Image (cartoon, rainbow, N blue to C red):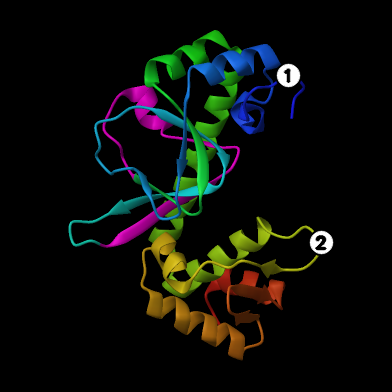
Amino acid sequence: MKSGARNLLYLVDLLADLDVVQLNEIGENCEWIRVSKGQEVISQNQLTTDAYFIVEGSVAAKGYSIEGKEVTYAEISAGQVFGEFSAIDQRPRSAAVEALEDSYLARMDSTQFRALIVDYPVIGLKMAELLVRKNRSLTDRMFEYSTMAVHQRICTELLRMVDAGNADGKHLIEPAPSHYQIATKLSTHREAVSKELARLSKLGIVSSGRRKIEVLDLERLRQLAQSGIY
């Protein structure tokens, strides 16, 4: 902990460059809340505009169709911010946000959040960089949906999870999301994910077990993601 900090905001990437006095002042303007795994923090189309800093835990941003189909847009981990879209543009929530695990959040109203961006140029720059990253990520996914077959999208998602995972040379995804969770990220259904993982296992490309997926042949997985040809 930063010496003298009275809160955990120093763990938030957006605020990491601020000094202790600034962090303490910002923390006093936040409401600190604990949420349980599975609890909805924000509802889709809700008319609220607060921004949230995650100091412990993680959440997922999701959308639901009229028929109830679930789509996961992003998983947001400790140290990150969510709710910033509505805090900035004052429009209704574009997604629901649900806790993936017990989490500890700092909630700030939109007026104070917007002032934060104006008053601290380093935060404004980081926020611009964050929004660009999110835009690039959504652009990449739109391209994948438009040009790739479902089995290619599954292979691409496995590569994405491996890249974000272990740094010890192993191509291990642990804990791995459920087949249903993977499906909600890729606009498909659980059966398609289960079938593809079984096929990849039979080919010796991956090995999957309870809450664990190991990529055994990274190069072949890359080739399948690019060409779609077995």
Q: Is residue 223 above or below residue 161?
A: below
Q: What residue appears at the point 52 percent right and 17 percent down from the top-left corner?
A: 28
Q: Is residue 70 magenta?
A: yes
Q: Which mark is residue 4?
A: 1
The answer to whether 101 appears left or right of 18 in the picture is left
Q: Quadrant where the C terminus lies? A: bottom right
Separation of marks 1 and 2 at Cα, in angstroms: 35 Å
Q: Is residue 125 visible?
A: yes
The image quarter containing residue 165 is bottom right
x then y, percent, for residue 191: 39, 80
Q: Is residue 155 magenta?
A: no
Q: Is residue 173 above or below residue 141?
A: below
Q: Quadrant where the N terminus lies? A: top right
- What residue range appears in magenta? 69-95
Q: What residue appears at the point 58 percent right and 20 percent down from the top-left corner?
A: 123
Label 2 CA crowd tier, 10 Å (few <14, some 14–19, many 20+)? few
Q: Which residue is mark 2?
A: 168
- Residue 155 vs residue 224, the one in the foreground: 155
Dot 2: element: loop
Kind of residue sitting beneath label 2: Asp
Kind of residue sitting beneath label 1: Gly
- Residue 147 vs residue 113, the one in the foreground: 113
Q: Which mark is residue 14?
A: none
